[in-house]
Image (cartoon, rainbow, N blue to C red):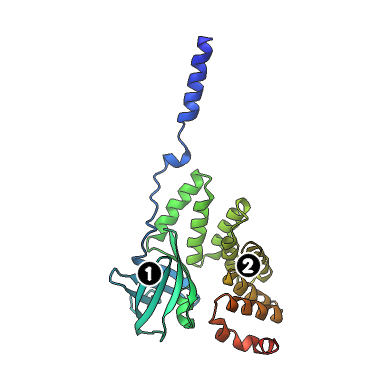
Amino acid sequence: MIAFSIILFYICKETTSKPSPESLLKINKPNDSSIIGIWKHMSPHGPVKINFKENGVVETDLGDNNSVDVISNYVVQADTIKFIDKDGKSCPNHGIYKIYHRGYTVAFDVLDDLCNGRIKSTSGFWVRPNHMEQISQLNTIIEKTNDIEYVLHRGRMYLALSKTKLAKKDFDTYLKKDSLNAKVFIHRAATRFPNGLKGIVYDCNRAIALDSTDKNAYFLRGLAYYGLNEKQKGCDDFQKSIDLGFEILKQAEYDKCKEYWQNE
């Protein structure tokens, strides 16, 4: 009986003291409490770099070629940011965006902005200048753990860099284990342009079923429907996105949809 107890003690001791894969790794998670500093991403018009300074000024480099093309003031309140352009290729009115800061990436989602150029250059995911080092670290973490949150971080980083095939692969992996995250379906939809239009409709349908208030799901589905020559459906989705706050679409999609909108 004593011998059995000793054996059981060592079995339990080994089981409870065995370190997890995560504890064997030195994980240096990026700071997710401040946007101060430089961020980069690939916009529809090419690479962009922004530099948020502590004095409330942000400099935008359209082209990431060490120039300053726009100088703006910014104000952060809770999870929103207001841009007020002051100099350069500026917009006359302010723009307000929701901030999603996750350390490895920051994303800006337009809430109130009628400047199409700023929306295109600002919206979406951004990464830090040392993003390749961070991706390398994520590769190691993902290889040694089963934490799909790190897969999602990497997918967002790939999306910021317009590496859509790699991003889609990570979003596929994530959604196999968590199919209740509407945002990730929208992320994956964004990777399917320009040739995966039916897949975009599928992903946006899934996102809308989970969250019917996300304007981006209707916008992306509208683009896909329009590309599939289902123009009425596309314009209906654009209108729904406008109703949910994507005001710029009234101007941006007017020529496409005026005949459909006038009939309503």
Point 48% across, 83% down: residue: 114
Give the amino acid at mark 1.
Val
- In this rendering, position of residue 107 left or right of residue 38: right
For the residues labelled 1 and 2, say whether their Cβ atoms are less than 8 Å apart: no
- Residue 132's quadrant in the figure? bottom left
Query: Which element is circle 2 on?
Result: loop
How many numbered callouts?
A: 2
Q: Amino acid at mark 2?
A: Ser
Q: Along the polypeptide, which appears first: circle 1 or circle 2?
A: 1
- Residue 12, position in %: x, y? 50, 24
Q: Which mark is residue 76?
A: 1
Q: Residue at (51%, 15%) from the top-left corner?
A: 5
Furthest-left residue in view? 55
Quarter-of-image position of residue 213:
bottom right
Q: How far is disc 1 from disc 2 in space, using C-alphas?
A: 27 Å
Label 1 CA crowd tier, 10 Å (few <14, some 14–19, many 20+): some
Tag of residue 35: none
Disc 2 target residue: 212
- Which quarter of the figure is the C terminus placed in? bottom right
Residue 185 rendering spot, x and y as whole percentages: 60, 62
Residue 47, given in percent of the width and then of the height, sits at 43, 73
Q: Position of residue 18 (x, y in %)?
A: 47, 31
Instruction: Residue 203: name its quadrant.
Output: bottom right
